[in-house]
Image: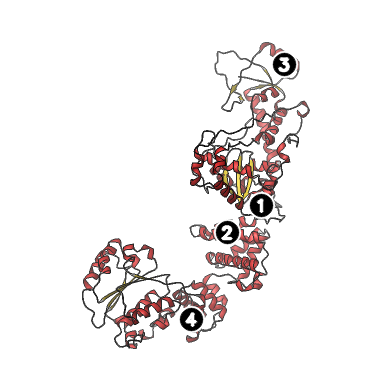
Amino acid sequence: MLNNKYLTLYRQYRPKTFSEIKGQDHIVQTLKNIILSNKIGHAYLFCGPHGNGKTSTAKVFANTINCSHRDFNDLSPCLDCINNIDRNLDIIEIDAASNTGIDDIRELREKIKHLPSQSPYKIYIIDEVHMLSKGAFNALLKTLEEPPQHVIFILATTDPQKIPLTILSRVQRFNFKKMDCNILFNELKRIFENEKILASDEVIKLITKLGNGSFRDTLSIADQVAIYSANKAIEIKDVQEIFGITDVKNVIDLINLLNAHELKSALNLLKNLIYNGTNIDIFLNQIVETLKDYLFYLETKDATVLENTKIEDINLISLVKEKAYEYVDNFIDLIKNIKYSDMPLQTFEITLIKLSAIKAPNEVYKNTIENVKSPIFDINKLVNDDLETQTKENKQEVEEHNDFVYFENEEEINNELKSETKSNFDSNSYGIPSLSSVANDDAEENLETVNIDDLIKQTDEIILSENTAEFENSDIANDIITAEFDNTFDNLNTKATKTTITLDLNEVTAENKNSNLNIEHSEQENKFLNIKRSHVDFNDLVNCFLIRILTKKGTQEFKEDLTEVDKIKYADLTFRLLAKEFTDELAMLQNLKIVFSNSNFIIVSSEFEEKIEDINLNAYTIKFQKAIKKLFDRHMHVFGVTENEVENIKNWWHNNKATLQSMKPKLFEDLNPYYEVEQKEKIAWAKSTFGNIFKMKK
């Protein structure tokens, strides 16, 4: 029974002579020349990917050297030596993975003193040598450097970087490479013919592709598939079922669904594939390979460059080039991230959500929610309900705490004024008059009639929303100005030129006392509304980066670096701009890189020039600025730059150091007074709720 035991294909077809070693011609020829010239060294290192013949080549080399029956010019061992190689006492194979300790090496050092029993050399093949401990390597060092004349060491490893340099410097190194797919295909086809295994060329190509350049892995996969198919011909579907491979049609369908923004259908397709056994890692590789072939064909218009996809399948993909590049980048990132994820399917689905929202430069698409009855997504209704609830609560609070005293007519006001002549106001940390409790029970209550217009003039703004914490970071990611330019600014005059803006935005005329809450500035009030430019002025960019480098150096006037804070906020882009009114702005602001930001301006970059032009053209529109305020909690100048413009700034910086010494940075004008529509809305709401004349108790 033992004589009839089945040997797997990779064991049956292990090379026994130099002529049977495939795909490593550069190594085989060198070893042959070593034998022919009789320049046999004392130590060799075979390194390279697994399953490509390192150990087999070592055995062939050792057997050929030690074969005493061959002619001098014959580079093949005799049949007896081939059949008895595993019983040869002078060819010793050691597994370093299980003999890692210093005691094992000491035992080896004692044994090498003995002469070979019947061969010219005693040859030690140490496999997986990188597994030896540090002490074992140190014990082997002297023996490896000066072994007895009859001893040859052949070390084999897949990780040469783990071997100490002292060992590497004492051996001749041979680098094995991955097997070429054509060689694998021809060898596998020959083996299938010998074994009477029926398979088409398409099946053999798929098996060699799964082998990923490893001869042993390819034969193991072929063995498994052949057993699965029994005595029948191997079909493509058999390989796909065993290894969780999906048809290329499903890959193309997923790409087209994402391009058409059919997110629901794309998610359902993914779930069906995974539940039917598709391997996520292999599926992602299929997607990247298909997109790669698609881009190859788009750029070259040559079908011969296609490696994995047929031209008829390529023609089924409807995707613009810009989107294809975005898809490839995201899927490659997903391949890296999914290896470390505990929820691979959910990670995949989130990426699909992101990709389905990507819009081509000239594409008209709005991500709308239809037939949703839940009030969660009805933003307008939520705002109105919240406003109505807030009004009721405020009125109730006034009645309970008696902070405000309402008067029915002017006569009551005059009577009250006779007894109350003065009212003091406390200020909070923002300098805003606030309602406070009585500080001293014995003090007189001083009351004063206050007009809301007079009250508003005492402060720059009313802060009714939550405060945003800002912090500084000394580390600036992706620094555009490198450390070599720091000395340019050692003597730089950092005193900035600042323009003072005087603008009374709190003025509320009698005509709009009872107006609705939708108050906006006209074009005459906001001078920035007329600014339309596709590219940022070069001088403005230089000024921005001048401010940035001074901020990095920590000058007294420039300390505020909000880059890292804004990156955190930008990560919540989709959530912050959930409202339907920001659909266009959300698409415009996606997939940007924040270069630098402070309280007044932000620099963003993208590789797509069309996206940058859209941002610059809309940078000062009311709707875009409203989106910026929603995203970053402040209005500010938005400067979009392409990667080419970034390079131009760098080159200019190199060539104009003298000019930079005399430049004074200019502060950009604060945009908040021009776009604070929400502040006016709240003031109008306060007037409509409390009236123009009210009394405040200290």
Q: Which mark is residue 611?
A: 1
Give percent across and percent down for residue 253. Answer: 65, 66
Q: Nearer the viewer, mark 3 or mark 1?
A: 1
User: Of the numbered discs in the image, which one, if any, rests on residue 685?
Assistant: none
Mark 4 or 3, nearer chain start: 4
Q: Label 4, label 3: how many angstroms apart (C-alpha)? A: 104 Å
Query: As rendered, which of 285 and 156 lies closer to the eye?
Result: 156
Q: Residue furthest top?
A: 418
Residue under numbered circle 4: 187
CA neighbours of label 3 inside 10 A, class few (<14), some (14 to 19), many (20+): some
- The residue lying at 37 percent from left, 78 percent from top is 31
Specify the amino acid type for callout 2: Asp
Q: Tell me where residue 159 sits by quadrant.
A: bottom left
Q: Position of residue 200 (x, y in %)?
A: 56, 81
Residue that lies at the very extreme toward the front in this rendered image: 658
Inter-mark Cα distance, 4 to 2: 36 Å
- Amino acid type at circle 1 is Lys
Is residue 577 depicted above or below 343 in this figure?
Answer: above
- The mark found on residue 413 in the picture is 3
